[in-house]
């Protein structure tokens, strides 16, 4: 057993500490009452707390005893503090934010883009559509493209291409589609009237016409030179063309076959 003198000293110190803590608690409670009065004067009946602030109060309030919460909880009720703490504890076991097994569905805009590409380009297969999307910085697998088209009831490329209409073909290649042909002009020569042929090329989209050459009797060699001029990579009129419409004149076959 401690000496009486030591017990007296310990009791005195403990009393002083308790008294100091009591004064601090009294001040904090009075400060809360003043805060409430200010809120009432401003026409507010409650304090709007953020989730982070509720979590802080819940942790601190749960550490108190029931009597301690009754004495100290001034902003909210003790029952509210406990409800906040139960919700905070439940978040530890909440797995709704964890990524589920399997690949997430592609965004609706990506799905629409895949379907639009397939509809506008019947000749494009799964790989071609995938590569076009990668060019747009959209990563998607070939199998995903196939599944999206199958879900929408769109047939594979060979079937779509066989059923392609002329209107669909024009829409698919409108930017790079050209046509060419000859027309006759009657002129007066040294020995009388004569006919010359004018070879022209037209950009279908803009209807811009380019006169490629004029000749009385076009032959294979002349057509080859016209083709070289038109396909020149710097200023050739057909340098951006992917499709050229023409009739079955053998002159075209000679010219394009020589260049290919």
Image: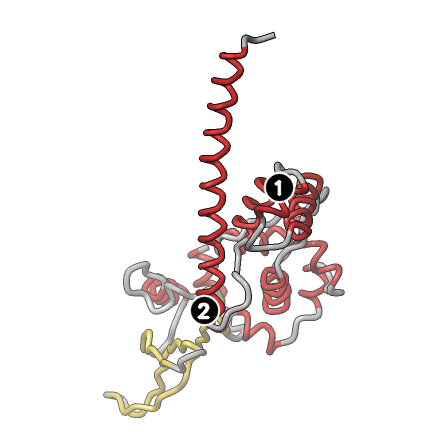
Residue 165 position (above or below residue 220): below
- Mark 2, residue position: 176
Q: Give residue 73's position: percent from left, percent from top.
A: 58, 49
Q: Give residue 70's position: percent from left, percent from top.
A: 63, 47
Mark pair 1, 2: CA separation? 82 Å
Query: Helix or strand or loop: what does disc 1 sit on?
Result: helix
Query: Helix or strand or loop: what does disc 2 sit on?
Result: helix
Is residue 122 among the parts visible in the rendering?
no
Q: Residue at x 48, y 36 (%)?
A: 21
Give the quarter of the image for residue 129. bottom right
Q: Give residue 260's position: percent from left, percent from top.
A: 46, 55
User: Closer to the observer: label 1 or label 2?
Assistant: 1
Q: Earlier in the sequence, mark 1 or mark 2?
A: 1
Q: Which mark is residue 68?
A: 1
The residue nearer to you, when weighing 248 against 147, is 147
The residue nearer to you, when weighing 10 against 211, is 10
């Amino acid at each position: 057993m401690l000496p009486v003198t030591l017990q007296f000293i310990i009791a005195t110190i403990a009393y002083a500490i308790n008294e100091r803590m009591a004064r601090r608690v009294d001040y904090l409670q009075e400060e809360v009452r003043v805060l409430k009065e200010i809120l009432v004067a401003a026409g507010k009946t409650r304090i709007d707390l953020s989730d982070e602030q509720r979590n802080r109060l819940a942790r601190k309030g749960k550490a108190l005893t029931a009597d301690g919460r009754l004495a100290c909880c001034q902003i909210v009720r003790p029952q509210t503090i406990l409800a906040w703490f139960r919700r905070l504890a439940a978040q530890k076991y909440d797995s709704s934010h964890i990524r589920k097994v399997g690949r997430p569905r592609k965004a609706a805009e990506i799905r629409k883009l895949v379907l639009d590409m397939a509809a506008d380009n019947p000749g494009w297969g799964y790989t071609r559509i995938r590569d076009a999307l990668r060019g747009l910085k959209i990563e998607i697998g070939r199998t995903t493209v196939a599944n999206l088209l199958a879900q929408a009831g769109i047939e594979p490329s060979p079937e779509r291409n066989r059923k392609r209409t002329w209107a669909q073909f024009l829409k698919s290649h409108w930017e790079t589609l050209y046509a060419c042909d000859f027309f006759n002009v009657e002129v007066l020569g040294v020995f009388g009237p004569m006919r010359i042929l004018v070879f022209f090329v037209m950009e279908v989209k803009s209807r811009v016409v380019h006169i490629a050459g004029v000749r009385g009797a076009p032959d294979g060699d002349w057509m080859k030179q016209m083709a070289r001029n038109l396909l020149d990579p710097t200023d050739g009129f057909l340098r951006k063309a992917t499709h050229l419409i023409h009739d079955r004149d053998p002159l075209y076959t000679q010219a394009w076959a020589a260049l290919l």
